[in-house]
Image: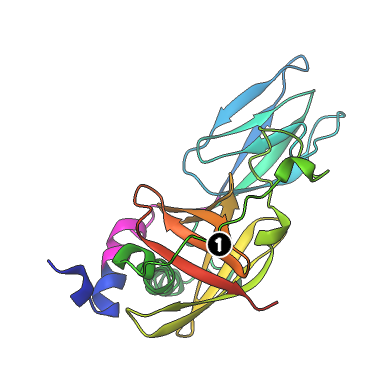
Amino acid sequence: MNSHNLTLPRAAALVLALVAAPGAHADYNITCGSEGGRHKTCALREPGYVSLVRQISGARCEQGRSWDYDRREIWVDNGCEAEFRVEQWSHRRGNEGSSSASSGDASSHDAAVAAAVVAGAAILGALASNKDHQDDYKYRDPNYYGPRHTSYVPGWMVGTFRGYNPMYGSEVVMTIRPDGRMNANANGQAINGYINDEQLHVGPVIFDIDQTREGFITSQKGDRHNEVRYRRIN
């Protein structure tokens, strides 16, 4: 099959089939505690964006210092014990509190359509030059606490960026917040993702992010020939 002949609905259907199976992705809470002040890891049932909901221990829980997370697990240390929330990729914050099954289905479908547009150029090959790549000296940032601080978001990733998907003729506007949440809009559809370990996570698809003079380039993990360029607008 020639991927360049995929239409948006067909591409969206492919993404939907991969990441929007009914009931496969639901937010959940997990409690993890450092025992005897020692380092401990707690496995995640499903990967997602992790935030601290409630501190249980008397010892302070500070992200990047006494707790953090990646796609596989949460780690805690120095006596930190807390309840954490794991938000799944398809969760749309505008639908919080809705108990309608049809609303949930629409949310997953909309997210899949947007994912096809946001990630589609990378999947279908909008090649961009990487000649203006710049290294990020993250260790100079006082907020970077060391190699275990995988939720760290470099300042150059924070803001609003615009990209263009030539395969769909669609403009994509992406916002990354200091807390690592990513929101994007394409063709009126919205999708959420998150930054972790200096990578963009959109459902099961992971993109490396390289800084450029104007913004950044996203490259699909495992296929660095497929890239999309984003330019900062705010």
Q: Position of residue 49 (x, y in %)?
A: 59, 50
Which span is picked out in magenta? 14-27
**Which image quarter: residue 127?**
bottom left
Image quarter of the N terminus: bottom left
Callout 1 crowding tier (Cα within 10 Å): few <14, some 14–19, many ≥20: few
Does 88 sit left or right of 110 as displayed?
right
**Which image quarter: residue 7?**
bottom left
Is residue 113 shown in magenta?
Answer: no
Does 58 sit left or right of 169 as displayed?
right
Out of 38 and 231, give the one closest to the viewer. Answer: 231
The answer to whether residue 193 is seen in the rendering is yes
Q: Secondary structure at mark 1?
A: loop
Image quarter of the C terminus: bottom right
Tag 1: amino acid: Asp
Q: How is the image coloured?
A: rainbow
Residue located beneath label 1 in the image: 132
Out of 155 and 88, give the one closest to the viewer. Answer: 155
Does 183 sit left or right of 137 as displayed?
left
Task: Identify the residue at image location x=69%, y=63%.
Answer: 158
Task: Identify the residue at image location x=63%, y=60%.
Answer: 181
In the rendered view, would you say 16 is above or below 185? above
**Which image quarter: residue 143?**
top right
* Residue extending farthest left: 1
Q: Position of residue 163 (x, y in %)?
A: 50, 76
Task: Identify the residue at image location x=61%, y=67%.
Answer: 215
Q: Position of residue 37 (x, y in %)?
A: 78, 17
The answer to whether residue 91 is seen in the rendering is no
Q: Position of residue 96 (x, y in %)?
A: 60, 68
Out of 134 and 143, give the one closest to the viewer. Answer: 134
